[in-house]
Amino acid sequence: MEAETSAANAPASAASDTPVTMKKMIMVAIDESEESFYALKWALDNLINDPSIIITLINVQLPFTPMVYPAGPVVFAAPTVVEAVKKGQHENATRILSRALHLCKQKMVKAETLILDGDPKDMICQAAHELHADLLVVGSRGLGKIKRAFLGSVSDYCAHHVQCPILIVKPSKEIPKSS
């Protein structure tokens, strides 16, 4: 995806006949679901045909909030418990992204990773905006209307709120749906 700049648009220091390579950034949202890995594989097979494309793999972990029971005394988790949970979440995100990086390496595609904490829907949209993603790729779990209404859909939310083009990759028939 090379773009040539015209003399009118070229910077003063650039020669008007020199092609300028524009880097494109594709962000792929990855979680532990097979549907997200299917979306990554689909993107690698069908979208990535140019070495100037940068892949950013993003994994968002929900923040840990200790359970507080309203019917009894207020219970707070000890700081060591909170740290242990956060460490476990980070290790899980690292494992997931390592698997995704391995797929990229097999296709000889260079990729970056990003681990964020927060609500996945909001954080994916925010990261796509802040990193100026040219395309967001997300997998779809193929939830029905009722499940989507109760559980929410990250892909549906992103389709309505992200500021860049989005590609929602539906699961193939061979992949069992995650609930």
Image (spheres, rainbow, N blue to C red):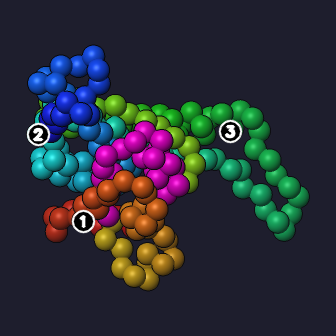
Residue identifier under label 3: 82
Identify the residue at image location x=82%, y=66%.
70
Q: Which mark is residue 54?
A: none
> Circle 1 sits in a helix, a strand or a loop, which is it?
loop
Q: Is residue 140 left or right of residue 79?
A: left
In three-dimensional space, the C-alpha distance between marks 2 and 1, rounded to whole angstroms, equals 21 Å
Q: Which residue is depicted at the point 50% across and 48% down? A: 126
Give the crowd class for mark 3: few <14, some 14-19, many >=20 residues within 10 Å. Answer: some
- In the picture, the disc for residue 49 is 2
Mark 2 or 1, nearer chain start? 2
Dot 2: within a 10 Å radius of its alpha carbon, few (fewer than 14), some, or many (20 or more) residues?
few
Nearer to me, 19 or 39? 19
What's the amino acid at mark 2? Asn
Q: Amino acid at mark 1?
A: Lys
Q: Is 39 placed left or right of 97 in the picture?
A: left
**Label 2, label 3: how many angstroms apart (C-alpha)?**
43 Å
Circle 1 sits on which residue? Answer: 170
Q: Is residue 103 visible?
A: yes
Distance of label 3 from label 1 (alpha carbons):
36 Å
Where residue 51 appears, as percent x and y from the top left, is 15, 31
Magenta stretch in the rendered image: 120-140
Residue 117: x %, y % from top left: 56, 43
Residue 52 visible, this orientation: no
For residue 170, which quarter of the picture?
A: bottom left
